[in-house]
Amino acid sequence: MARLYQRRYLKCPYNRARDLLAEAVQGAAQTGDERLMHLTFAIPAVQGAEVGKDVAVTVKAAADPMHFDQPWSLHWKPVSGLFPTFDGTLTVRADESYASSMLELEGTYSPPLGAAGVAFDTLIGQRVAAETARELLRRIGTTIESRYHAAEDAKDPVPKDV
């Protein structure tokens, strides 16, 4: 098992980011159905080269012992071919300022192919896993930020003479 941890800062307050993430994943979590997701990752040695892989994702609400954050348990497995399975959590965390928050993905994955997979993971796979996680967080984070800013822009401005 290899460990994975990535974080992305969001230009969105913690409470709104947490609610927007919940809106995005709650349907899948309630049904427990697998959802198909296309994960992409850059090939480290080749500038601009990208590879994609379809995975079946299951999302469930996870427990937070502090009762503060709302973590989501993620599990994915490849639909076909050689790609690791992953078990972890996706969580929005408070940042130091009201205007921002952090989106975190952490967990473990099992490289395929036994000892050969572990060797590949040591040489290249860890970088591929980190890049895949960064891309996933970028995609989710961009959606959260876009929804937040669209809602803020739609609010009626407060009259300046009041």
Image (cartoon, grey):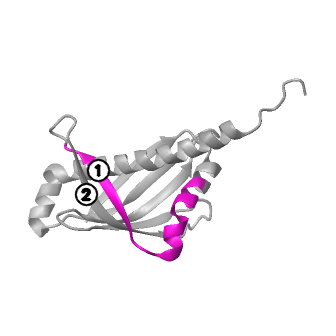
User: Gap between marks 2 and 1, in whole Å?
Assistant: 6 Å
Pick whichever, 147 or 122, lies toward us. Answer: 147
Q: Which of the labelled discs sits on residue 144, or is there none?
A: none
- In the image, residue 78 sits, relative to residue 39, either above or below, namely below
Q: Is residue 159 left or right of residue 54?
A: right
Task: Say which residue appears at 61% left-offset and 41% top-offset.
Answer: 150
Estimate the x, y position of residue 3 in percent, counting from the top left. 30, 59
Magenta span of residues: 20-43
Is residue 16 something one can see in this rendering?
Answer: yes
The image shows a total of numbered marks equal to 2
Estimate the x, y position of residue 126 in percent, counting from the top left. 23, 52
Does residue 37 belong to the magenta stretch?
yes
- In the image, residue 79 sits, relative to residue 39, either above or below, namely below
Q: Are marks 2 and 1 in contact (CB under 8 Å)?
A: yes
Does residue 161 belong to the magenta stretch?
no
Q: Amino acid at mark 2?
A: Lys
Q: Which residue is mark 2?
A: 53
Marked residue nearer the N-terminal end (2 or 1): 1
Residue 111, image quadrant: bottom left
Estimate the x, y position of residue 105 in percent, counting from the top left. 41, 55
Pick whichever, 46 or 80, lies toward us. Answer: 80
Task: Say which residue appears at 60% left-offset and 64% top-offset.
Answer: 66
Classify mark 1: helix, strand or loop.
strand
Q: Is residue 114 left or right of residue 2?
A: left
Q: Which residue is mark 1?
A: 40
Classify mark 2: helix, strand or loop.
strand
Q: Amino acid at mark 1?
A: Thr
Q: Residue furthest right?
A: 162
Task: Say which residue appears at 25% left-offset and 52% top-offset.
Answer: 52
Q: Residue furthest top?
A: 161
Estimate the x, y position of residue 70 in percent, counting from the top left. 57, 62
The quadrant of the rendering that contains the N terminus is bottom left
